[in-house]
Amino acid sequence: MDHETRESMEDIHLRILRITDDLRVIQRELNCAAMQAPTDPELMEALSDPPEIESMQVLKSALDQMRHFLWFYMQVVTSDSEMGEKLRQSLRQDASVRASEAEQQFQSATDSIMLRYLADSKYRKPN
C-alpha cells in the first residue's frame, strides 16, 4: 500500500470514529427528547414539525443506505471465498467499464467542440 493510500485510509478511519461518536450523541439527545415529549406538549409539537420529521427521514435513509453498503463492503473485503473474489472482480470490471465510458464521452465532447470551432472559423473574417 503506498503512502497516499495509507493516509487516505487513516483519514477514513478518523472520520468513522468522529461520525460514530456524533451518532451516539444524536441518539442520546433524541432519546432524552422522546422521554420528555409526552409530558411537554410544546416539545412534542416541535419534534413533530415537518422540518424535524424530514431531517429524521433523511438521516434514517442515509443510515439505511450506509448499512446496506457496509454489509456489501464487508462481504467483499473479508470474504476469501470464490463468491468474494467474483464480487471483487465484478467491481473492478464495472470500474473499468465506467472509466472507458467516461473517456468516450469526454472524447465525443472534445470532438464536438473542435468541430464547432472549425465550423465557426470558416465564417470568421481574418483580422
Image: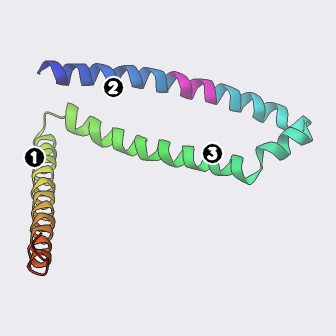
- Badge 1: how crowded within 10 Å, few (<14), some, or many (20+)? few
Mark 1–mark 2 distance (CA, rounded to whole Å): 23 Å
Q: Which mark is residue 77?
A: none
Name the chief secondary structure element in magenta.
helix
Name the residue at 89% across, 41% down.
42
Give the image quarter of residue 11.
top left
> Looking at the rendering, in which quadrant would you find the C terminus?
bottom left
Q: Nearer the viewer, mark 3 or mark 1?
A: 3
Q: Which mark is residue 56?
A: 3
Secondary element type, mark 2: helix
Name the residue at 18% across, 22% down.
4
Q: Do the numbered discs 3 and 1 sit on residues whose CB atoms are within 8 Å?
A: no
Name the residue at 11% across, 46% down.
92
Question: The magenta stretch spans which residues?
Answer: 21-26
Q: Which mark is residue 12?
A: 2
Give amino acid for label 1: Gln
Left or right, residue 2 beside residue 43? left
Expressed as whole percent of the image width and height from the top left, the position of residue 99 reads: 13, 53
Secondary element type, mark 3: helix
Q: Nearer the viewer, residue 48 or 15?
A: 15
Give amino acid for label 3: Met
The residue that disc 1 covers is: 89
Q: Nearer the viewer, mark 3 or mark 2?
A: 2
Magenta stretch containing residue 94, yes or no? no
Expressed as whole percent of the image width and height from the top left, the position of residue 33 reads: 77, 32
As drawn, 13 above or below 117? above
Expressed as whole percent of the image width and height from the top left, the position of residue 1 reads: 11, 21
Give the image quarter of residue 81.
top left
As drawn, 50 above or below 109? above
Mark 3–mark 1 distance (CA, rounded to whole Å): 37 Å
